Amino acid sequence: MSSPRIVLLHATPVAIDPVKAAFAEIWPEPELVNLLDDSLSPDRAKSDDLTPELIERFISFGRYAYLTGADGILVTCSAFGPAIEAMAEELPVPVLKPNEAMFHTAVAQGENIAMVATFRPAVVTMEAEFADYVAQTGSNARLTTIVVEPAMTALRAGDADTHNRLIAEEADRLADFDTVMLAHFSTSRAAPALSARISAPVLSAPGAAVRRLRELID
């Protein structure tokens, strides 16, 4: 059997390297195709809600990914949850949200969970997805979100060190949680810096997503 073709849908370039690194470490066999529309993230930031126009644009993005011969599609931007759900219903291949696998791991590790986000427009959809997952599983898990927007500003300017430092500086606010999730693929690069300052497990989305997609494809 030939290697599966996995299409990665990116709405920002800062998500690309973390997921490529996760595939290289966990599942190097697939042929990876990277599709980037870097207008999606700033356009999403202009509106409090995910508009019907943005939903249709994102679904069209997924249709194109499927037409490239995708055996599976992994979305790396966490701000388009309803659009990803609609895409998954339409396309005949596995379509994975960026954070669903990480939510599963976090809830299995404790009930008092924190999430560190750097892109505020993604928070509403992510919190809704987390609440849906908790309701489906009957868990008593509760989520507290901390937003560190200057970290994303630094990362987009090419300053990953400042991005990581700003997230690690939230350690005192995160000390009493059972588990801490880094909300976006782009924030996963801060995991070592934050893990060095807190005792709770620090979860990042790319590794969990790659493992889950491998299960779906296999």
Image (tube, grey):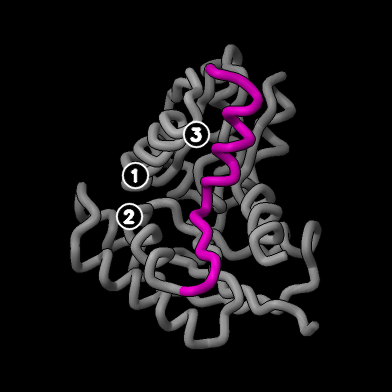
> Which residue type carries mark 3?
Val
Residue labelled with disc 3: 116
> Which residue type carries mark 2?
Pro
Residue 217 picture quarter: bottom right
Tell me which residue sits at (55%, 34%) in the image: 167
Residue labelled with disc 1: 125
Tell me which residue sits at (50%, 62%) in the image: 75
| Sequence-first tag of 1 and 2 | 2
Left or right side of 85 for 76: right
Residue 163: give x, y in percent of width and height.
55, 44
Q: Are marks 1 and 2 in contact (CB under 8 Å)?
A: yes
Residue labelled with disc 2: 82
Q: Is residue 17 above or below residue 30?
A: above
Marks 3 and 1: which is nearer the front? 1
**CA–CA distance in space, label 2 to label 3:** 21 Å
Give the residues in magenta.
92-111
Q: Residues within 10 Å of mark 3 (few under 14, many from 20)?
A: many
